[in-house]
Amino acid sequence: MTESMGYRPTPGTPVPILLDTDIGPDCDDAGAVAVLHTLERMRKVQIVGMTHCTSSRWGAGCLDALNGYFGRGDIPVGTLKRLAGFLDDDEIYGKYNKGVAQGYPNRYAGTEEAPDAIDLYRELLSKAEDDTIVFVAIGPLVNLMHLLRSGPDRHSGLSGAELVARKARHLVAMGGRFPDGKEWNFEMHPEAAAYVVGHWPTGITFTGYEIGAEIRTGRRLHMDTPDDHPVRRSYVWYGGEGGVRESWDLTAVLYAAEGSSDYWDVVRGRAEVDPVSGANRWEPHPEGRHGYLTRKMDPEQIVELLDDLLVRLP
């Protein structure tokens, strides 16, 4: 199986990851960041950078605060600056990112102080080795659409699509409902979902709604972490004391680090997304450049694994 047809991390080599997240609307983004940092300390991944994909002024600060808590305050963080007013209502989409950004040390008081996500992506990609970067997208795909459509700049003479084709290895996208259906990340910006799914130059693996929905994690956060742990606080602010949450974004991060392993099977084919509704449909093909995860391991076993990764302290 070639890389364009599937994805397998190289054993013993940390996977270089660029994380694109809408951190704020749902607490599982904070959980995914915690899991990603644990996987980095286990030398399974290398966090190259993170970007925030909504217009919330608290997203970059929240990411930077979490990275600092986990001892990686040096990680480059960018934010969406090319679309105003996108999912920026604090009452709906700021249930915890504002609290983390204001309550924990970070470099960014608001999005105006954080780098533009596309400029940061182009800078980091230009410095990366060819065919290495794994993108993990756990929110609407607007940043990735803008990246593909970007032109040559001070970082590279290549277009965005050319730069991704040269530097990226794979895209792991939490989005869609498979084999056919609708899911929030795609629905929030259907044009971006359709464009990225149709034009991304590497293989894509989708961790669909149905995968994370049956894996509810976070219970141990309320038992095995300090009261002031920012991810614990995020889960409390979002869902109340002792609450758990579906693991849509945590499963995407785990797949990027370890591949399907014993956890999931992968169905190969080709996805299409309607640019108006965000609904996705699937065409099976054994050599398709897209794949989506299906259940293999009992979900409760993955709950135990993810909860253990979630609560490990820096």
Image (spheres, helix red, strand yellow):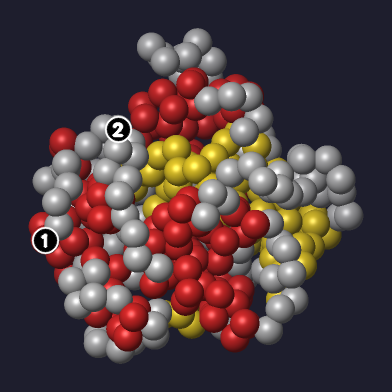
Residue 160 visible in the current orientation:
no
Q: Is residue 6 above or below residue 268?
A: above
Q: CA distance from mark 2 to mark 1?
A: 23 Å
Residue at x 65% of width, y 37% of height: 169
Residue at 16%, 37% in the rendered image: 112
Report the mark closest to the observer, 2 or 1. 1
Whichever of callouts 2 and 1 sits on the residue coming sooner in the sequence is 1
Indicate the amino acid at tag 1: Gly
* Mark sitting on residue 225: none
Label 1 element class: helix
Q: Tell me where residue 177 appears, x and y as whole percent.
A: 61, 69
Which image quarter is the C terminus in?
A: bottom left
* Between 215 and 149, the one nearer to me in the picture: 215
Q: Label 2: which residue?
A: 116
Q: Position of residue 182 (x, y in %)?
A: 56, 69
The amino acid beneath tag 2 is: Asp
Question: Position of 71 compared to 172: left or right?
Answer: left
Residue 103: numbered disc: 1
Question: In the rendered view, would you say 88 is above or below 212?
Answer: above
Whether residue 173 is visible: yes
| Residue nearer the viewer, 235 or 40 | 40
**Residue sitting farthest toward the bottom:** 242
Q: Quadrant of residue 114?
A: top left
| Position in image of residue 15 (x %, y %) | 58, 44
Circles 2, 1 touching at the beta carbon (< 8 Å): no
Residue 235 screen position, x and y as percent: 29, 76
Residue sitting at x 71%, y 44%: 10
- Work out which quarter of the rendered image holds the N terminus and state it: top right
Please tell me how crowded label 2 is: few (under 14), some (14-19), or many (20+) other residues with Cα within 10 Å.
some
